[in-house]
Image (cartoon, helix red, strand yellow):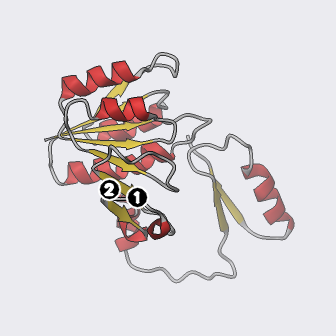
Amino acid sequence: MRLLVRADASHAMGAGHVLRCLAIAQAWADAGLGELTLASRELPPSLRARYEAEGARVVDLGSPDGCTARSFEELVRSIAPHVVVMDGYHLGPEDRRAARSSGAPLALIDDNREVDVSEAALVINPGPRAHALDYGATPALRGLEHALLRRELRRAAAGPPRDLALDRAPVLVTLGGSDPRGLTEPIVARLRARGVPVVALVGA
């Protein structure tokens, strides 16, 4: 079988779309389901390496100006995937039609009913408020029980519980794969001003 993932990452956009699709890619690889391709643009080398470590083929769709629905459609037709997963609010109707051009079912990842799901075979929304959203007749996996957790997070959660001294434990501050608005520093400064121990985690 062949899985095609369509997601982008950049400093301005962050890495969330590509990283939660990585959870699906890892599950696909762990189950030995077959070939895996990521079609992306502006993908940082560290994220490319994460997918390639799962045995994925990574296709660079070029710059935002150079990536067209037509070029993506050509890729879809050449791969002839059995399933297409798409994640990104900026991906429009032409991208969704291109994703379905080979006849494969399309799974869309959504957060706040921000995408048109009329062409999707499945919606995945792991948000805590997903059950309140209307996806019409489109089947949907909703709620935290469908959280897209990468392998390292699943392993950590399955490990033995640790006794944390919460009065001495630091606060973890992370805004994901990038911080385009520069919020990490002022958040850390305000916490430290109150005497709170802090660990800041920033993306590659």
Tell me whether the residue at label 1 lies in contact with that at label 2, contact meaning CB atoms closer than 8 angstroms: yes
Classed neighbour count for the residue bearing mark 2: other residues with Cα under 10 Å, few (<14), some (14–19), many (≥20):
few
Q: State how far apart marks 1 and 2 are (Cα).
A: 6 Å
Q: Position of residue 114 (x, y in %)?
A: 51, 49
Q: In the picture provided, is 15 more to the left or to the right than 152?
A: right
Q: How many marks?
A: 2
Mark 2: which amino acid? Answer: Thr
Instruction: Write down the residue under mark 1.
Output: 135
> Camera-side residue: 44 or 110?
110
Q: Quadrant of residue 169?
A: bottom right
Image mark for residue 138: 2
Q: Is residue 15 visible?
A: yes
- Give the x, y percent position of residue 75: 27, 23
Quadrant of image for the C terminus? top right
Q: Picture quarter containing residue 87?
A: top left
Q: Residue at x 57, y 50 (%)?
A: 176
Tag 2's secondary structure? loop
Q: Is residue 178 above or below residue 94?
A: below
Image height check: is 5 above or below 159?
A: above
Kind of residue at disc 1:
Tyr
Local crowd size for mark 1, using a 10 Å CA cut-off: few (<14), some (14–19), many (≥20)? some
Q: What residue is at 34 percent from the left and 39 percent from the top?
A: 51
